[in-house]
Structures are given as structure tokens and as C-alpha cells.
Image: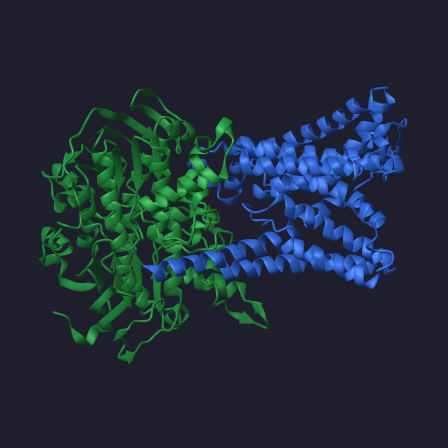
């Protein structure tokens, strides 16, 4: 009896070690790349200014990755987020030019994104298109829509406080600790984390991604859950678009081309499974940070761009391979 | 009785164990050329284990096999194919996007200069189909355009295209119409005349009588009887299949049926059930017997709103009408799916998530889910049902079949439903867990819950249930008390023997 209990606690320890590794895997990766560049470039890499810069560089991808995390946990994928970001910057600058206050313009951009998401959701739940195809179509269509709205030009917008979201803090702003855009990402991350963990809707997203049939059997509104996931996914992409606008200060229909792949990569490096049912908010943010650290570190090392791209690609493959290996061990 | 010279395959003293379970306990079997041997027995009697030994999927622990006078020891299914022992399974194994000819010659395409010789492929496929007497199937047709019956013929053509010496047909008619069955039999007779040795596995005894020359009965991993099909009456064969004491395996506490909790009237689904009526009382267990494909699962799914309903009335306690699964849960009905892995459980999720998925709101304030309380609830059921696991976080995919099933049932208990629909609740789990699940079902009924249980294993239905209704080709017959019927009668009703006699 006592022995049994001992064995139980032993196996519990091993289990918690596994979950700990799973949770910490991406963090260890982040610490490793950060440490590596800190050792190689001790003078100009691990400085407070550079660290703040890296946070700023992460904000756009990180915010969109929050939405993508939900999409991927639900067993889907969204290839259109780069186009949504561009569309969002265009809508915001158009609204500012019409004279709307900045907050209304930003909300308008986000609403446009959520509308795109609901179209994707309808395509997937009503027309039964696979998420890959539906969002591949929207990837092209929304980029086109953004260009059409902008008349294939960059739209210059009147200056407003929106432009300051991603500026490094000036001396009288130090009380904020982090730039407002970064705070936005952090608060949204807490929101999504809470949603996934503490609400029925969140648990349903995991269930749909893990096994849609089981979810249906248990009375989960599968279609509605998916619709909401894609609306949130595109909505968060549009919020990332607000940050992108703040960084660009103009509406640019060609911006963020290919960024959808960085966003998906961040989520996958963070430990989410493209098969669905798995993924964490913290992991995705850490995944996004890893990619920024590599990019920033490579620049500081004065490595050419192509080296940085190879390294980033390698990290994606290593991260997923490690994840597979861990899965095999558990099985 | 058997002409030794014509024997193509001998299996002698075949034994196979899985841990403590004895699947095969010294089975003897001879198959003659130009004859059809029927292999009969209930589910779990060892038919499929024996065929897996024959096809090289299992290695026997003891015993020998002789094929055409030579020792035959396949180490894997590929060996068996090389020795020209061919199987046609219930679930067809064709590549739906390829043509008939490509399927028939798959893996043995004639090659010249590194290219597949297409005309040769077409020709040999045509020959094989001609051998079956089916010129109507075109070799270039894509397989997914064919009917189920035609696909089965393609599969048989694949077997004879390699010049098979032994052909095994495993439950070949379970998804065929009466007309297609006759066509299949014509093919089997043709193959017989061409001197093929055929093993025919079925639990439709009428078919066995019609098509086979000899039969062998398996029970509990042993051959318990054999004979010439023509000279042994069906009743006697059923007697050999059943012949078992069924008593203490099934705990039964005294229970009295209460008010009606579920009333189903003339329920008709899209293809099945055709017509089903049933009344279920509180504190009662009603079993649904029938063959695979009779429409039992479809009946449960229609009740639960998982399959569309065409006609019929359903009254569940105070609620009248149809409903979605979500509605059914709130009305106090729950289901355990027959397919644990792909529907019943989300196997990558934790025990907790699986148990509480249908009722998350109940474990936290204001519609929020509190993971801590969720785990506490799960821990309670783990202890109560004695589920062997590491902790509540463990993915259910890592549990044994019996423990997985307990998790699936725990979901219904956590939801505290009044009516439990259990579809094959003991499929694929060990005997020990089976008994625990029987005990649990009994306990639930004595607490006043209503249970409908579908099972292909008759002794269990008669042992656990108060009443049993038989489903035959989509029609649900009236439920009768288990004290009034025995296995033989149920089996006759399920195989349509009685229906034939009434005509």
C-alpha cells in the first residue's frame, strides 16, 4: 500500500516534470538565444534600450499571434491575417482623413477585421471549406480589397496619438514602464489566456480542436465556436494592424506581406499543435519574442539578412521536432 | 468426413495468448480445395484472432499450419500474400481515388522498362473480373464511383488476381442488400468450382446454411463443434455457439421500474431506423440486440439528435419533440458512443476535460470555469469508479480501454442524466472492467435511472437488462422481458430466421 503510494507520487513527479518542460520549453529556448547574443555582443545587445526595442518589434506579430493561437487550438489555420493587418491600416487612415477621432478610426479598423473574420467563419462552417482554402482565398481577396480602398497608394493620415503607440518612451513617460502598444499586447494576452482557461467558450475551443465529433456529442456548439474563433482571430489581426499603423504612421495596402507566416511560426514555436487541441498564450508570445531576438541579434552581429532567415527557419523546425519527440515519449 | 487428399490448409493446435487472456486455445481447422468452410461463433469467440494468425498479423504461441503439404509460417501479412493466402475484410481496403484496375494490381503492377504496363494491368484485371463472372465492372472505373457491393467484388478480384490458394471472406454481407448477397453467392460458387479453398466467416446462420459445405464452431478460443452444414439443423449450430453458463458474471440488484422516462413512437431516421418504438421506465435497463448494420446505433443517435429524424415522436420525461445534443444534455439524457477513440473521447485532452466537457458551467460561478473545481469533480469520479490513472491531468489516450470507457460513462454521471444511452459499452475492454461496468449499470438503474444499452454480445444483454428488443434491418421489434426469451430466440430474431418462418 505504502509502496503503491510511493510509486504514485513518483509518477506524479515525472508527470509534473513533463508538464513543466512543456510549459517551459519555449522559455528555455528564449533564454538560450538571448543568452547567446548577450555573450556574443555584451556591449550593445542586452541593454535596456535594445530590450525595449525588441518588445516594440514583437508587438505587432505578438498581438496577431494571440488570435492565431485560438484559431490553431481550434484545429484551424488563418492565412489571411497579413492581409487583414494591411486592410486595417488602410481603413484607419481613411477614417482619420474623413476627420473621425483616432479612437473611432482604430475601432473602425478592428471592426473591419472582425467582419473579415465572420466571412471566413461562414465560409468554413456553412460552405464547409477547409480553413486552409477559405483563408487562402481571403488572403488574396483582402489584400486586393485593401489596395482597392487605398487606390493602390500609401494613404497619408493626419498625425494623432495613434502614432505614438509604438514609440520608445521619452524621459517624462518613464512611469509607464513599457510603451502603450506593448501594454496593449500584454493586456490582450491576459484576456485571451483567461478566456481560454476560465470560460466555457475557451474550453470549447480546445474540445473542438482536439476532437470535433466528441465536442458535438457533448453538446458543444461547434459551428458557433468556430465562427467566434475566426472573428477573434481576424479581430486580433486588425488590432495588430492598429499597432502596425502606429509604426508606419500611414495606411499601406502592401504592408505585412508574408507576416502571416511569422505569426503562425510564433504560435508553433510556442508549442501549439497544428492538429489542434494544444497551445498556450504564453508560448505564442515567447515564440514571437524568440523570432524578434534572433532578428535583432543577427542585426547586432552584422550578419546578412539571409543568415537570419536560415536561423529563423531552423528554429521553427527544431522547435516542432522537439515537440514531436516529447509527444512520442509520453505515448 | 474430410478427404485428406483435397485438404489445402491445415491449422493444428493453434494457441495465442495476450497476457493472461487466452484468445485461442488449441484450434484445429482444415480447409479443402473446392469447398466452402464456414467459421461461426459469437463475437469474441476467437474468429478474428484465428484469421489474424492465418494472415500473419499475429504469431501463434503454439501449433502449426500446413499449406499444400508445406509448412506455412507467415511472419507478417506480406508473407501471407506471397504465399497467396488472401483476406477480404468487412471494412474494405481499397484506394477510392484509383481505378478498379489500379486497385486490383496494387503493389504487383507488371513493369516494363520502369513503366507500369497499363494494357497488361487492364488485361489481368479484366481476366480476374471475368473469373468472377462480372464483366459489368469496367477496369478503368474509379473505385469511389462503385457501389459497396461492386467494391467488394473488386476486392475479391484482387485476391484471385494473385492466384490465391486460400480465400477468407470476413463478414462479407453485413453491408449488402439481399439482391447483392445472392450475386456474391453466385461468385463464391463459381470460385468453388474453380477449385479455390474458401473460408466464410459470418454470424448470419441462414447464409452459412446456404453457401457452405462444412462448418466449424468456435467458442472461447476453442473449436467446439464441426460438421457438414447440410446435415446439422440451425438450432443445433446455435446451441454450439451459445453453450455457456451465464450467471454470476452479471450482478443484479432488486429494482422496480418506476414512471415512464422515455417514450419513443415510430421513430424513423434518414436510412435507419425504419421504424422504432420503445418505452423506458425509471430504474429499468432495456437492451437492444441485433446484427451489425441493423440500425441500432442509428436509433440511439437519432434519439440523441446526432442523426436527423424524419418522423416520429420522442417524449423525454416532460419534454416532447426532437432536440440537438446540447438540448438533450440539458433535458437529462446522455450518450456513450460505440466509437471511443474517434467520437466518444477527445483522447489528447485530459481526463478532467473529457469528464466535464458537457457541463462546464456547473463547476464555477457566473458561467466561469474554475479548473481547480473541475479537477476536484473529476477526482471524485476517478475514486468512485476506481479509474486507474496517474492524475486528473493525464490525457485519456494513455489509459487502458476499460478505464477510457469509465471516463466516458463518468461524463454522464457528472452531468447527472436520467436516461443513459450506452452503445456497446463493453466493446474492446477486458473482462475485469466489463464486470465493473455491469455493476455500475446495475447500480445506476437501482438509483432510478433509465438505461438503453446496445450490445452485440448476447449473454451480456440477457444478463444485464430487464427487457430486450431486437432490431432487424431497421425495424425495432417489441421489447420482451429477459425471463421470457433466451439467446437462441434472440439470435433467430436478429438473423431473420423467425421472420422467414412467419411468411
Q: Nearer the viewer, residue B195 or B213?
A: B213
Q: Nearer the viewer, residue B77 or B331?
A: B331
Query: Which residue is found at the position 11% from the left and 44% from the top?
Result: B486
Query: Which residue is found at the position 30% from the left and 20% from the top?
Result: B318
Q: Position of residue A324 (x, y in %)?
A: 57, 58
Is the residue B184 above or below the residue A74 in the image? below
Query: Which residue is found at the position 65% from the left and 36% from the top?
Result: A233
A102 left or right of B378 in image: right
A153 left or right of B349 in image: right
Q: Position of residue B104 (x, y in %)?
A: 44, 60
| Coloration mode | by chain
What colour denotes chain B?
green
What colour denotes chain A?
blue
Q: Is residue B148 visible?
A: yes
Q: Position of residue B283 (x, y in %)?
A: 21, 32
Is the residue A89 above or below the residue B207 in the image? above
B172 left or right of B219 in image: right
Amino acid at each position: 500500500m505504502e509502496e503503491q503510494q510511493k510509486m504514485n507520487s513518483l509518477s506524479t513527479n515525472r508527470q509534473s516534470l513533463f508538464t513543466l518542460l512543456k510549459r517551459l520549453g519555449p522559455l528555455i529556448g528564449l533564454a538560450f538565444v538571448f543568452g547567446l547574443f548577450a555573450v556574443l555582443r555584451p556591449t550593445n545587445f542586452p541593454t535596456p534600450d535594445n530590450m525595449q526595442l525588441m518588445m516594440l518589434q514583437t508587438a505587432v506579430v505578438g498581438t496577431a499571434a494571440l488570435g492565431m493561437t485560438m484559431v490553431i487550438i481550434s484545429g484551424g489555420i488563418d492565412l489571411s491575417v497579413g492581409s487583414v493587418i494591411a486592410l486595417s491600416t488602410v481603413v484607419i487612415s481613411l477614417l482619420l482623413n474623413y476627420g473621425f477621432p483616432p479612437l473611432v478610426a482604430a475601432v473602425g479598423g478592428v471592426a473591419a477585421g472582425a467582419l473579415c473574420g465572420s466571412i471566413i467563419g461562414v465560409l468554413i462552417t456553412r460552405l464547409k471549406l477547409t480553413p486552409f482554402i477559405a483563408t487562402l482565398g481571403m488572403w488574396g481577396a483582402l489584400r486586393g480589397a485593401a489596395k482597392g480602398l487605398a487606390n493602390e497608394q500609401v494613404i497619408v493620415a493626419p498625425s494623432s496619438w495613434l502614432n505614438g503607440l509604438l514609440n520608445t518612451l521619452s524621459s517624462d513617460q518613464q512611469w509607464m514602464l513599457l510603451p502603450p502598444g506593448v501594454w496593449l499586447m500584454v493586456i490582450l494576452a491576459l484576456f485571451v489566456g483567461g478566456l481560454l482557461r476560465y470560460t466555457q467558450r475557451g474550453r470549447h475551443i480546445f474540445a473542438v480542436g482536439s476532437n470535433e465529433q466528441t465536442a458535438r456529442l457533448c453538446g458543444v456548439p461547434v459551428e458557433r465556436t468556430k465562427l467566434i474563433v475566426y472573428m477573434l482571430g481576424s479581430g486580433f489581426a486588425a488590432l495588430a494592424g492598429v499597432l502596425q499603423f502606429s509604426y508606419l504612421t500611414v495606411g499601406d495596402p502592401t504592408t505585412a506581406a508574408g507576416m502571416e507566416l511569422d505569426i503562425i511560426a510564433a504560435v508553433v514555436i510556442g508549442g501549439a499543435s497544428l492538429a489542434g487541441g494544444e497551445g498556450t498564450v504564453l508560448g505564442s508570445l515567447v515564440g514571437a519574442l524568440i523570432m524578434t531576438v534572433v532578428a535583432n541579434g543577427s542585426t547586432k552581429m552584422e550578419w546578412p539578412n539571409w543568415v537570419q532567415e536560415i536561423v529563423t527557419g531552423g528554429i521553427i523546425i527544431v522547435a516542432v521536432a522537439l515537440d514531436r519527440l516529447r509527444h512520442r515519449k509520453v505515448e | 468426413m474430410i478427404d485428406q487428399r483435397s485438404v489445402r490448409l491445415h491449422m493444428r493446435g493453434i494457441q495465442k495468448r495476450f497476457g493472461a487472456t487466452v484468445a485461442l486455445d488449441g484450434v484445429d481447422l482444415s480447409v479443402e480445395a473446392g469447398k466452402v468452410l464456414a467459421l461461426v461463433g459469437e463475437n469474441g469467440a476467437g474468429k478474428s484472432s484465428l484469421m489474424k494468425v492465418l494472415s500473419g498479423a499475429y504469431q501463434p504461441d503454439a501449433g502449426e499450419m500446413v499449406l499444400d503439404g508445406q509448412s506455412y509460417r507467415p511472419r507478417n501479412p506480406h508473407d501471407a500474400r506471397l504465399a497467396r493466402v488472401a483476406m477480404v475484410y468487412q471494412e474494405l481496403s481499397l484506394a477510392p481515388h484509383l481505378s478498379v484496375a489500379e486497385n486490383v494490381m496494387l503493389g504487383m503492377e507488371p513493369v516494363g522498362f520502369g513503366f507500369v504496363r497499363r494494357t497488361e494491368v487492364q488485361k489481368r484485371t479484366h481476366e480476374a473480373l471475368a473469373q468472377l463472372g462480372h464483366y459489368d465492372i469496367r477496369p478503368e472505373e474509379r473505385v469511389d464511383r462503385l457501389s459497396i457491393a461492386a467494391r467488394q467484388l473488386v476486392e475479391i478480384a484482387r485476391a484471385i488476381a494473385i492466384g490465391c490458394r486460400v480465400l477468407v471472406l470476413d463478414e462479407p454481407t453485413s453491408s449488402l442488400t439481399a439482391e447483392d448477397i445472392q450475386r456474391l453467392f453466385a461468385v463464391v460458387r463459381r470460385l468453388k468450382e474453380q477449385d479455390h479453398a474458401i473460408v466464410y466467416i459470418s454470424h448470419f446462420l441462414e447464409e452459412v446454411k446456404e453457401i457452405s459445405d462444412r462448418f466449424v464452431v468456435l467458442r472461447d478460443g476453442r473449436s467446439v463443434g464441426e460438421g457438414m452444414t447440410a446435415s446439422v439443423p440451425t438450432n443445433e449450430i446455435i446451441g454450439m455457439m451459445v453453450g455457456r453458463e451465464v450467471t454470476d458474471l452479471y450482478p443484479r440488484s432488486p429494482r422496480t421500474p418506476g414512471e415512464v422516462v422515455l417514450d419513443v413512437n415510430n421513430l424513423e431516421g434518414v436510412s435507419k431506423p425504419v421504424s422504432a418504438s420503445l418505452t423506458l421506465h425509471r430504474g429499468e435497463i432495456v437492451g437492444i440486440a441485433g446484427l451489425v448494420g441493423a440500425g441500432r446505433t442509428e436509433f440511439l443517435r437519432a434519439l440523441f439528435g446526432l442523426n436527423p429524424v424524419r418522423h416520429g415522436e420522442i417524449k423525454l420525461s416532460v419534454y416532447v419533440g426532437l432536440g440537438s445534443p446540447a438540448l438533450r444534455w440539458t433535458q437529462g439524457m446522455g450518450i456513450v458512443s460505440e466509437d471511443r477513440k474517434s467520437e466518444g473521447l477527445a483522447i489528447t485532452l485530459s481526463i478532467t476535460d473529457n469528464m466535464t466537457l458537457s457541463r462546464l458551467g456547473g463547476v464555477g460561478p457566473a458561467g466561469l470555469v474554475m479548473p481547480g473545481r473541475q479537477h476536484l469533480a473529476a477526482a471524485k469520479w476517478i475514486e468512485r469508479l476506481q479509474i486507474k490513472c496517474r492524475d486528473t491531468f493525464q490525457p485519456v489516450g494513455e489509459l487502458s480501454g476499460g478505464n477510457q470507457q469509465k471516463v466516458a460513462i463518468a461524463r454522464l454521471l457528472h452531468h447527472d442524466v436520467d436516461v443513459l444511452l450506452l452503445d456497446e459499452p463493453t466493446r474492446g475492454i477486458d473482462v475485469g472492467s466489463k464486470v465493473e461496468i455491469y455493476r455500475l449499470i446495475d447500480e445506476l438503474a437501482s438509483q432510478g435511472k433509465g438505461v438503453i444499452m446496445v450490445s452485440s454480445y448476447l449473454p451480456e444483454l440477457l444478463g444485464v437488462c430487464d427487457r430486450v428488443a431486437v432490431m432487424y434491418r431497421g425495424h425495432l421489434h417489441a421489447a420482451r422481458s429477459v425471463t421470457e426469451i433466451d439467446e437462441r430466440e434472440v439470435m433467430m430474431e436478429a438473423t431473420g430466421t423467425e421472420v422467414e418462418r412467419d411468411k
